[in-house]
Image (cartoon, helix red, strand yellow):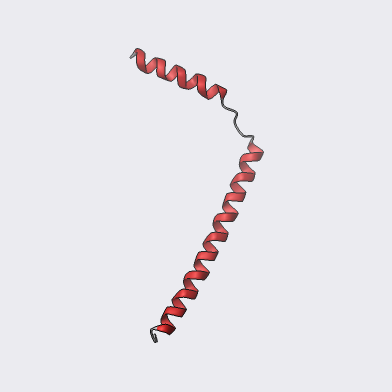
Amino acid sequence: MDKIRKFLKEVYEELSKVTWLSRKDVVRSTIAVSVVVILVAIYITVVDFGLSIFIDNLLGGR
């Protein structure tokens, strides 16, 4: 039990040394990541659709 208590005390001490981002920075980062994810999803969708049409025409689809 002493090992667990010691471990938790050390974890608390280390976490108190961490410099946390401000709420404003977190919101900005979240928005930036969301925009990049949406752009990548759109890009992959367009490429997939284009390749699908190309393969259909190449193989003499419907």
What is the quadrant of the C terminus in the image?
bottom left
- The residue furthest left is 1
Please report the residue visible at 56 percent of the width from the left and 58 percent of the height from the top: 38
Residue 27 place in picture, x, y as percent: 62, 43
Q: Is residue 34 placed above or below 43 in the rendered structure?
A: above
- The residue furthest top is 2
Indicate the quadrant where residue 24 lies: top right
Residue 2 place in picture, x, y as percent: 35, 12
Q: Is residue 57 left or right of residue 41?
A: left
Please report the residue visible at 61 percent of the width from the left and 45 percent of the height from the top: 29
Q: Is residue 50 left or right of residue 29?
A: left
Please report the residue visible at 43 percent of the width from the left and 84 percent of the height from the top: 57
What is the quadrant of the N terminus in the image?
top left
Please report the residue visible at 49 percent of the width from the left and 21 percent of the height from the top: 12
Q: Is residue 50 placed above or below 8 in the rendered structure?
A: below
| Tally of marks | 0
Residue 18 place in picture, x, y as percent: 56, 26
- The residue furthest front is 58
Residue 26 place in picture, x, y as percent: 61, 40
Q: Is residue 51 placed above or below 5 in the rendered structure?
A: below
